[in-house]
Image (cartoon, rainbow, N blue to C red):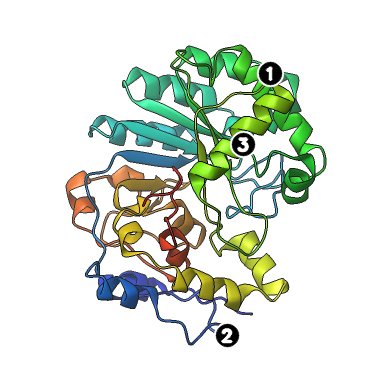
Amino acid sequence: MKSLKATGNQLADPAFQLTVLSRDETEAQHLPRFHEKLRGAGLFPLVPVAPSVLQINVGKMCNQVCKHCHVDAGPDRKEIMTRETMQLCLDALAQTDIPTVDLTGGAPEMNPDFRWFVEEISKLGRKVLVRCNLTIIVANKKYHDLPEFFRRHGVEVVSSLPFYSAAKTDSQRGDGVFEDSIRALKMLNAVGYGQEGSGLVLNLVYNPAGAFLPGPQKGLQDQFKRVLLKDHGIVFNELYAITNIPVSRYLDYLIESGNYAGYMEKLVGAFNPVAAAGVMCRNTISVGWDGSLYDCDFNQMLELPVAGPVRHIRDFDAAVLARRGVVVNQHCYGCTAGAGSSCGGTVA
């Protein structure tokens, strides 16, 4: 199946950017376009609010190759953010009062300048959130001190754990991942993460393993807390239930398994205007490993840059970015289905 991408001239046209750039035109053609759903809810064009998160992908290199990864990350990926681009991010951040910097990858810790970057962001008085895959902590002894480094800088740790059993976790992320994740969680707990009154936040992320939407976030959180404490003595703060977005490896899985059309029908049928109004692309600016700007991490992976003249962090202009329209596509149904989905879990 052939993907469609916009040409340079089309991407320069804001009117084109505010319509759907279809990822696949051969299945689910009968489904309404996402911008039509937004228009029906009185939300098109989708416009940003004051940004509260600068999300930065510092590279696609990772020690894992997860089946659901929308970044298509892995050990062989060479895309790594340079210190020069990191400095441009710091310069842009200093111009704003954006309170949170969300560092992601790949495994962000594998960027050679990762620790320097965390330290410099902390000097600006911003909260640092790191999306840690857990296994990186135990993968090599040079990473064993990460829990202490995180603690020292007050980093909020958000970690993926597909399930509280080895079978389901390993089927999605690889053999032995669950065992290594449990070891890493115990190391984080040991320095205070997830412990009541410590102020050190440890949140977990749940993604469904198949072609279905996640269950209610609160119920899943209660299950995870009960089982992880009982079986492993592990504590954490919150669980984020995140819908799998039909891009990259997960899209490949849907197409290869014959589930693409059915999954898209589920997402469209569960469209929630309240969730659409609260999508993360409205309050987040996403920075790619090369400094390019996007409305969200998913648009970044589909190479759909922000609308308007400011396309790179070197040209950062908060006022100009505030006047843009958010670029939408059929994959956006994933963030607006049911209770909604964002990097911080459900939104409605």
Q: CA separation, marks 2 and 3? A: 39 Å
- CA gap, disc 3 to disc 1? 25 Å
- In the rendered structure, which amino acid carries the disc numbered 3? Phe
The image quarter in which residue 142 lies: top right
Q: Is residue 308 left or right of residue 111?
A: left
**Residue at position x 62%, y 52% in the image:** 69
Q: Amino acid at mark 1?
A: His
Task: Count neighbours of disc 3 (C-alpha within 10 A) and say few if under 14, some if 14 to 19, many if 20 or more.
Answer: many
* Percent x, y of residue 47: 23, 59
Q: Helix or strand or loop: what does disc 2 sit on?
A: loop
For the residues marked 1 and 2, what is the alpha-carbon distance in whole angstroms? 47 Å
Q: In the image, is residue 166 above or below residue 195?
A: below
Q: Which residue is mark 2?
A: 26
Which mark is in front, 2 or 3? 3
**Mark number for residue 224?**
3
Residue 256 image-quadrant placement: bottom right
